[in-house]
Amino acid sequence: MVSVSGVRGRVGDGLTPEVIAWFAAAFGAYARRRGPGNTVVIGRDSRVSGAMFARAATAALQAAGCDVVDVGIAPTPSVQLAVEELGAAGGLAVTASHNPIEWNALKFIGPTGMFLDGDESAEMRAVREGGEIPRATWQELGGWREDAGAVERHVARILAIPFLDVERIRAMRFHVALDCVRGAGGTIFPRLLEALGCTVAAINLETDGLFPREPEPVAENLGELEALVRQSGAAVGLATDPDVDRLSLVSEEGKAIGEDYTLALASTLVLRHRKGPLVTNLSTSRLMDDVAERAGVPLVRAAVGEINVARRMQAERATVGGEGNGGVILPDVHLTRDAPVAAALILQLLAETGQPLSRLAAGIGRYDIVKEKLPRPAQPLDAVYDALAARFPEAEADRQDGLRLSWAARKAWAHLRPSGTEPIVRIICEAPTREEAQGLVETLREALPA
């Protein structure tokens, strides 16, 4: 499966070292053409197939004339930050993020440390599909070196956030429960939490990629962490995914509060210190509208996808942003989702307010989201969107990415967009109660043309 940000698939079933090498060589040729220079950073999460694919990608990059800087097992945001810090031409992250254990992927990173956007991806695709990929002769082959400092530099960058009061957090001596799902989080979270003076009860710190649960850190997958919070008396439970760009929270009561609250709470903290636009995507909870309203700042919504949010944050000079899947983007560190950044912001919020996480989450508010899949209509989707917008003239319509209908007075919204991998349309509806959200799904289902 090829998308703007990379290529992914099941290991041995479509995704092979040969496929990885071909895409890596194309990226190497693209990176050399674009510059600056010919250095490409590579890093990976802990998946069992990761070392094999990293070696294949490294060889292909060298064959394309790129000097490879290998940061080893590291969070994806650490890899992205290394690209930026080293002034590299780009980077490759070997990770399938929250996908199940049998998956892996390549993610393409531009020289800014951000994932490739649509235009950049099209340029790389032209290299990939334009015939024989350029290869270096023997005297032009790229070099290779290790960089063992990427994670430490990432931690230092977090601790240097201007409004992060490290000494205040250290003085609180927080008890933290941690679940890194045996992914790359084990390389960074213990270091960060130690630097912040936390006492840590941890599970799944091993970086062997043998995920003991479904790797996506949604509430239903966090039962073991909930139990650990209760047993250890922790003030907060932190759960991440294998490549460490998403963070989910468990309250001091031992209850997973849902990944939507990560961005809402982190944004609340940031906006206490500096005002500015808040950016999120069209499918993120209305909690963000409430956070922005309370802070007196504008909320801007972008198309779904991290790079779309990051680019919009650049354009709006946003103070903070991210996605409702637990992905927090703080420009003070870099423009990418970053679970360790999110964790530091949550600990700062706990320290500043002196309130337990459950009370802070309750103060944010609550809505219910219902997600469904429907068969893709026979007629063109633009015509479907036109019909739905006409059917609900009282709703505010946003056509950036599919169709988003918003009923401000009802505090409800619906987002319809096509799947990139299946012949279906995804519907996400949110309202103050589950019954209202489900009713909105049914209303839209009935209004959709056959």
Image: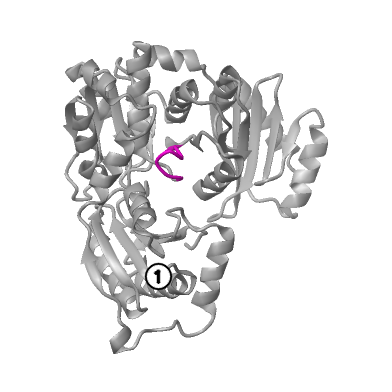
Camera-side residue of 122 and 378:
122
In the rendered image of this protein, does residue 125 appear above or below residue 405?
below
In the rendered image, residue 329 lying in the magenta stretch gets the answer yes
In the rendered image of this protein, does residue 368 appear above or below residue 380?
above
The residue located at (16%, 44%) in the rendering is 206
In the rendered image of this protein, does residue 359 appear above or below residue 54?
above
Q: How many marks?
A: 1
Q: Position of residue 259 (x, y in %)?
A: 42, 31
Camera-side residue of 248 and 38:
38
Based on the displayed image, in which of its 4 quarters is residue 312 positioned? top right
**298 to the left or right of 222:** right
Based on the displayed image, in which of its 4 quarters is residue 238 positioned? top left
**129 to the left or right of 59:** right
The residue located at (59%, 55%) in the rendering is 423
Q: Position of residue 445 (x, y in %)?
A: 68, 37
In the rendered image, residue 112 lying in the magenta stretch gets the answer no
How many residues crowd around disc 1 within 10 Å: few (fewer than 14), some, or many (20 or more)?
A: some
For the magenta stretch, what is the residue range?
A: 328-335
Q: Is residue 72 visible?
A: yes
Q: Is residue 49 visible?
A: no
Based on the displayed image, in which of its 4 quarters is residue 333 positioned? top left
Q: What colour scheme was applied to this rendering of the protein?
A: one colour
Q: Which residue is mark 1?
A: 37
Q: Position of residue 136 (x, y in %)?
A: 36, 84
Q: Position of residue 340 (x, y in %)?
A: 32, 37
Camera-side residue of 429 and 446:
429
Question: Could you tell me what secondary structure mostly forms the magenta stretch?
Answer: loop
SS at mark 1?
loop
The residue located at (23%, 24%) in the rendering is 176
Q: Amino acid at mark 1?
A: Gly
The residue located at (55%, 74%) in the rendering is 126
